Image (tube, helix red, strand yellow):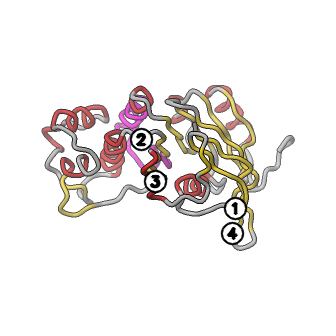
Amino acid sequence: MLEVKCLKLTLNGKPIINGLNLEVKEAKIHGLLGMNGAGKTSLANLIMGISYPDEGSIIFEERDITRCTISERAKMGLTLAWQEPARFEGLSIREYLRLNKNLSLSEVENYLWTVGLPPGEYLDRAVDANLSGGERKRVELASVMAMKPKVAILDEPDSGIDVVSLPHIMNGITEMSKQGSAVLLITHSEEAVGVAEEVSIICAGKIINSGPPKEMCRWFKNNCQTCNHIGKPSYKGV
């Protein structure tokens, strides 16, 4: 469904994405696991059209979208959830979830229940600084679910949240896949990729291993978490 082929990006003379290849299949959750500085967010930005690669191509539903704008990609069915969710003073959660779709109240409530937020307590709350980090992440995930995208790129949805919010975030991601959305789940957490069907490990801007979640988490722990050379692979085979 979504293919990234031989993607390269250099910033200030430093290679950020270095010949990266990746495939995300329809209605599947694909985990992208990597340490800080490995190129995860840079890849998300390239896929969404926030920046453009120096070389390589991005293919979505057999169409080359490498030079398409953000709005063009959004109309095709791609969306990106930021690592730090936006805040909207004066906008209620009810209004926020209904921005992109003409959703019924019951649909809005169902999305909130899916991410563990009781509608009676949250519908009329503002999407602002009064929400905790975990609450804002869950509200944003509910809004992405409401869009029903073909591909959702989730950049560190588990980052900076409380332990209570994590299972609700993971449940929302699983439900997105069930409703037909493909998910690229970007994280540095082994726990988060447990909901994925396949996991790819990124280091120094390239995919260095791919496979089932348990196998990749074990490999990541043994090779990446013990590596002190961030952005500079130091083990055999990379």
| Numbered badge on residue 11 | 4
Q: Nearer the viewer, mark 2 or mark 3?
A: 2
Q: Three-letter amino acid code at disc 1?
A: Leu
On the image, the x and y values in percent for residue 215 come to: 68, 26
Q: Amino acid at mark 3?
A: Gln
Q: Residue furthest right?
A: 236
Q: Are marks 4 and 3 in contact (CB under 8 Å)?
A: no
Tell which circle, 3 or 1, labels the residue nearer the N-terminal end: 1
Q: How many marks?
A: 4
Height in image: 155 above or below 89?
above
Residue receiving disc 1: 9
Identify residue for label 3: 83
Q: Secondary structure at mark 4?
A: strand
Residue at image point 27% right, 35% down: 111
Q: Is residue 71 in the magenta section?
A: no
Q: Earlier in the sequence, mark 2 or mark 4?
A: 4
Tell me the CA gap for discs 1 and 2: 26 Å
Residue that badge 2 annotates: 149
The amino acid beneath tag 2 is Pro
